[in-house]
Structures are given as structure tokens and as C-alpha cells.
Amino acid sequence: MRTRITLLCLATAIMGILADIGIHLPNFPLSWIIENLLVAFDFYSTVRAIKDIPITSLINLMLLIGALIYQAYKGRETRLLGFSFAVILGYRLSLFLGNLPKLFHQFNLSTSIFMLGNVLWVWIAIRMLNYFNQQKTLKTEQSEKYEENYYVAASAGQRLFNFLIDTLVALLLLFALFSYLLKIEWVRQAALSLSDLLGERMGFLFIVALFRFVYYLGFELAFQTSAGKLLTGTSVIKNDSTKLDFKTTFLRTLCRYIPFEPFSFVFSRTGWHDRWSDTSVVKEEKAVGKPALYFLLIPLLLILMAVFQFFTYQISSYRTAKAYTERIEKEQNDLIEELNNLETNDFIKTTSNSDFYSTVYLKPEKIEATQITFTAIKVSPEGAEQKEKIEAFYLKNKDTLPRITLSRKELIEAVKGDKDQLKGIRLPEMGFYKINGVSYHFQPDLNPIIQHPYKSKFVVVNIRNFGIPATILKIENDGGDSNIKWEIDRPQLDNYLSGTLGSILGKSEEPISDFKIRIYVTDSLHVARVYRLSSADEGHRLKRLKP
């Protein structure tokens, strides 16, 4: 049993630590299910409002160290493991209760697996805490006066530590629960009504007090302990040495809310909630010879956590830098591809390196093998993004606008360039301008809105057209899942100002992971065009291919 507990805790802690730093299982069937079941505690994904506090890292490290200590002391030292499983129990129970309404309103495989994982971890945590309870022994000393053994009361320091830890854990679990419950309309309305009745601060304190009542009642009734007491190695018993029953636990918990009750410890080692419920908090036998040595784990955990956070930060910084570099390189390559395939109705947008609001569009007039002649269209800041005004201005003034000839090499080098230098081209009598992109004019300009639920067998693509009207003629698979059958739902691609969208549907007998297709259209000028669309193109303009 000891070995199985150790292996479970090590696997869970390692999976949690890897998830903290963003390392996940390889993508294979059921990998997401296995990871959801193995990662016991992931506070970051639950309460993102306090994601900068390394709570998840600390719990996973405590679980890892607790498993090693548990094995080293042959199953006799359970404080860190007990505390970790108490937090996991409260956390997973909070997730289950918080997501229970969602299970009835949005039943699907993903939600079901998530809820099953919560139930499984609640069951495991209860089994572990009950097992540790069976293994523990309360500390006794012999009375000099009556020559009999008695249980040793917890020290004042332990009682204070218990209070602080239990309060912190209760708040964390409350945040986890309410991060889901507040998404429910009637819960939000009830919280607002309470806030209006008691005031914002008093309403919050009332909810915290109510949750702490349930927290203490549940833990002490079920396990005669709490998360804080598990960490300090203390338990609650009735003064007749029997386990707590519901009546005693309820009275003990209720007495905690008597005004000034915490000050009852000032002149006594027991508080009112102990004396009036006829209970005591006593010490447990510890496997570690000197308890002071055990608490050296606290600075050790802090050091390990600092190292872990530094390591996580470095990995995150590297990934962010790498993703940024890859994004810039992709944007450059896409822009170079568009420059190599320029048509006479493709306008190159440039902005001044010295004046961001100075915008010049370069409209190709004569495209040759090594050079291109452009019409330079300088627009006002107000009209820089208004396609219709730019086109109208060009048609009205094209005979008087300046002409510029640039080599293809100049255009490509202006995009590539050295990343440490300003990129761009020098326009005569205008200055140095940076190439921002290519816009489509006097032709369709298609942008997809992809609706593809995870692992679903269908995909819907609505298409906005920011250019001249067009009609979808046919669709062909061009890679990805080749078994997808495509249908044209709304073939007409009117300008987006009309309020209508084109639409295509893809269906398959198997879940669709990704897709790549070619869309053949003809525009209102009777020009045939081909566009490429992939599942990764959400939010990006469709790439035009040569027919």
C-alpha cells in the first residue's frame, strides 16, 4: 500500500509540475483525458485573477516532497501528504459543485470526463485521508499525579498556525468554487442582492464566514482534523477520548463565530469553541524525531519554489520569444509571397518611419520580370483604412499621381532586411517608408469566420467579403482531412456592408482535426479566382492562388 501511495503521489506531482511549466503529454488519442485525470491540482486554470501567485507550484512541490518523506519514513510521516490531499479534496469538490449546473445544461464528452475526474479525485483524497487517520497515533504522556496516560494538548503556536493555514485554504477553495458559480445568472443575482442588502464588504465577509463554517464542519466531522491540523500533526477529539459526532462538531464550529472568540486563547491554551463543545485539539505522534527539523521544510519549499518559478519564467520567456520570432517570420514569408504574386489591383500599403500617420499606397501599373512601376497614392490619416475612398481617389486622380519604379529585389529586401535595422523603401520626394502589407482592391477580399467545435464531425465557415461581389463555384480538399465533404450553403459573397455572408459546410464521418481547401469563385467582373483556406486561418484573409 505504501509503495502504491508513493507512486501515485509522485506521478501526480510530476504531472502537475510539468503542466505548470507548460509541458504536456504528446498528442495521441485520449491524451487529454489522461492528463485531466492525472493532474490533481491546477489552480492557475481555475482562478486566473491570482495566477501570479505560485499556489499550484507550492502544492505540487509539497506533494512531491511529501511522497519522498512518506516513503523514507516507511509510511509513518504523513503530514505533508495529508495536507496536500486535504487541499485536493476541497479543490476537486469545489470544481465538481461549481460545474454541476453546467453538466445539466451542456452535457458533452469533455464536460463528462472533467466531472468524472473530479469525482475520482474526491474519492482518492477521501480514501487517502481515511487511511492516514487509521495509521496515526495520538501522543500521550504519563500523569505524575494520577499515574495514568493523557493526551498532549496542541501548543499555542500550533493552534495559531492551524488558524492561519485553514483560513488561507478556505479562501482558496472559496475562490475556486465561486469562479464557476458566478457564471450562473441566478447566483450572480443572489450575490448582487446580498451585496445591496449588507454592503459589498459585509456581503463578502458573510459569504466567507458561511464557507468557513462548511469547511470546518465538513473536515472535522469526516476526519477529526482540517488542512492546517494535518500540516501540524494535530487532531480534534471529544474530552471523553471519542470521535466527534455531528452535534458536537456543529456546536464547536458555531462557537467559532462568537464575538471576540479568538481572544479566548490569550489567557488559555483552549478557546471557547473547545471548552463549550467539550473538545480538545491534541498532538499526534510524529515519525520525525525533532519537529523543528521537519519545519526546515518550509524554507526548503520556498527555495525550491523560487527556483521552480525562475525555471518556469525562463521557459515561458523562451517560448514567448520563439513564438514571436516564428510569427514575425511567418508574416514576412506571407508578405513576400504576396509581393511575388502581385497583380495590378493589389495595393502595397506603406507608412512613414518618421511619421506613423503618413500613409502611401503603391498601386502596380506595369509588372515586369525584374521591376514594377507603381502609382503612389498618399492618403490622409482619416482615409488610410477606407478602401472605397482610396479606390475613388485613385480613379479620379490616377493621371496626375506620381509614378515610381522599384525592382523586385528592393521590395523583397525591404521586407526581409536586418531585424536590427529599420526595414522599408525610399520613395522619391517622400522619404523612407515601411511596407505593412498588401490590400486587395477592385476584387474580392475574403475573410473567414470558422466554427469548428473540438473533435466535432462538422465545420462551418462563414465568409465576409470586403471587396467587390463574387460567387462561390466549387470547393476542393487540398490536404488535411481529405474525407470531408463540402457543401456550398450560401454561394453569394456580397460586400460586408450588405450584412450578408457567404457560407460553406464541411461534414465527415470521423472527428475533424484540421482541413485545407481551395475555394473557386468568380467575381462581378467575371474574373475567376482561387483562394486557399485552412483550419488555422481564423481571423486572417484568405490567400489568393493563381488560377
Image (cartoon, rainbow, N blue to C red):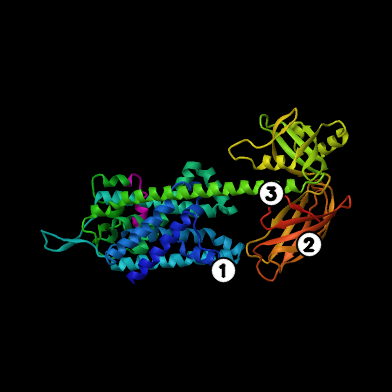
- Expressed as whole percent of the image width and height from the top left, the position of residue 433 reads 70, 34
- Between disc 1 and disc 3, the foreground one is 3
Q: Is residue 107 left or right of residue 46?
A: right
Q: Secondary structure at mark 3?
A: helix
Question: In this view, which residue lies farthest toward the top?
Answer: 429
Res 475 label:
2
Which span of residues is magenta-colored?
250-261
- Between disc 3 and disc 2, the foreground one is 3
Mark 2 or mark 1: which comes first in sequence?
1
Res 29 label:
1
Q: Secondary structure at mark 1?
A: loop
- Expressed as whole percent of the image width and height from the top left, the position of residue 58 reads 39, 53
Closest to the observer: 253 or 531? 531
Residue of label 3: 334
Question: Residue at the location (32% across, 52% down)?
Answer: 162
Work out which quarter of the rendered image holds the C terminus and state it: bottom right
- Expressed as whole percent of the image width and height from the top left, the position of residue 217 reads 38, 58
Q: Amino acid at mark 1?
A: Pro
